[in-house]
Amino acid sequence: MSEKIDPWSSSDIKDYEHVFKEFGLNKFTDYDISDNYLFRRKIVIAHRDFDKIKEAINNKKLFLQMTGIASSGAFHLGHKLNIELFLAIRELGAKSLYGICDIDAYVSRDDKKIKSMEQAKEIAVDNVSDLLALGLEPHEIYVQSQKEKSYYQLTYEISKKITENMFRAIYGHQDLGKMSAVLLQMADILHIQLPENNNKTPTIVGIGIDQDPHARLTRDVTKRLNYDMELPSFIYYKMQKGITESTKMSSSDKNSAVFLTDNKQEIAKKINKAFTGGKISLEEQKEKGGDPNICKIYDIFSFHHKDDKFVENIYDDCKKGKLLCGECKQKCISFLNKFLEEHQQKKEKLKDVAKKIVYGK
Ligand code: SF4
C-alpha cells in the first residue's frame, strides 16, 4: 500500500523501509561521521546525496547547512529534535543558517490558526528565543519577512519552473497558500547559494521524514533553474510520535506534545497521562517486564536525554520488570522540568535579541 506523507499534517510513518523504497531515499549508514547522540542512537535514518557532504567534511571543505520551521505555534519536543540535528551538523563544520518562516506560517495555515501576519511574527519571536536559548547564534537565524530582494527574485524564478501538475503529483492538491509557502521554502534552501551569499556550495538540509515531498520538489526544480547551484542534499531523522496513544505529535493537539513553553503542572499532567508500554497490573509488569519499544515515556528519554547509560538502564530495567511506570514517569517529569526550567529562564533573557531578528530593529 502507498504510504501517504503530508508535510502539513504531522504524518504518522508506520513503515520506514516502505517509505525509503517508495520515494527513493537512501538508508543512512555513515554513523561514524559524528558522535552526537542523534547519530549514536540511529535517530538519523535516511539521506539524499549525503556523500557530497561527507566528502566536504572529510576534506575540511566549505559546506552549508540550512533548515527552518514555520512560525505557526510554540515549539514542541518534535521541533527540538530538528534543532538538535542542526546543532549536530554545525558541529561537523557547516556554515549554518536557520529560517523561521513567518510568511509560510501565515499563508499556509488556516485563518483560525494564524489570523494575521502580526500573529505569525509574535510566534516567530517566541521561536527565535527558543533557538537562541538552545545555542544558535543571532547571525545564524533569519525570518522570511526580513529577507532581501534577491531572495524574492529567486522565489519568482522558482515559480516559473513549477507546473500545476508537478505540484499536484507531489502534494495531491493545489492549495494556493501552500503553493506560495512551498516557493518560499525552496528559496530558503537555495538562496544561500546565490552569488551574493556563498555561490555554488554543497548544502545539507536536516528534516523530519514527513518533509520529504519538499525535498523531492526542491531537487527537481534546482535542476531546471538558470542558476549555477549544487543540488541540495538532505538528511532525515525519525519523527517523535505523540505522547498520547494517537501517535502523532502535533501543535494542534495540545495533549499530544510536550511544548517548550509548558509549566510544571502541564508537564505532570501530560506525563502522567502518557501512553506507556506498561502491563495492566504491577504484578504482571514485575513478572513479564514492560515494553519500552512502544512507550512514549521511553521515546522522550531516547530522543532527548543525552546520557546513553541512563537511557540504556531505563530500557533494560523496564524489560526486566525492575522499573515500573509510576517511578519511570517521575524520572521523566524531573528530567523535563529541569530542562524546561533552565531553558525558559535562558529564553526570557533573549527575548529582546529575538525581537530585533524578527522586526529588524
Ligand atoms: Fe515505559 Fe518506563 Fe513503563 Fe517501561 S517502565 S513501559 S519505559 S514508562
Image: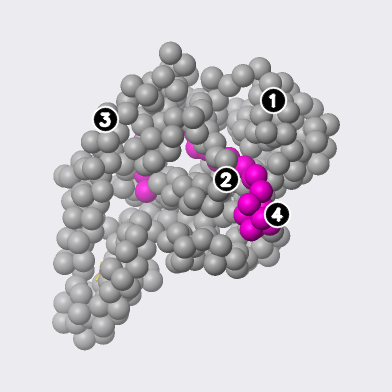
Res 3 → quadrant: bottom right
Farthest residue, direction bottom: 287
Compute the Cα span from label 3 to label 4.
39 Å
Secondary structure category for the residue under label 3: helix
Q: Residue at x 45, y 66 (%)?
A: 41
Say what amino acid the circle numbered 1 marks: Glu
The residue that mark 4 highlights is: 52
Residue contact between numbered discs 1 and 2, judged by CB atoms under 8 Å: no
- Residues rendered magenta in the picture: 52-77
Say what amino acid the circle numbered 3 marks: Glu
Give percent across and percent down for residue 166.
Answer: 76, 40
The answer to whether 236 appears left or right of 335 in the picture is right
Pair 1/3: label in front: 1
Magenta run includes residue 195: no
Q: Is ligand 1 within 8 Å of the beta carbon of the residue shown at mark 4?
A: no
| Quadrant hosting ligand 1 | bottom left
Q: Is residue 311 visible?
A: yes
Question: What crowding class fits label 4: few (fewer than 14 Cα within 10 Å), some (14-19), or many (20 or more)?
Answer: some
The residue that mark 3 highlights is: 348
Compute the Cα span from label 2 to label 3.
28 Å
Quick check: 321 above or below 133?
below
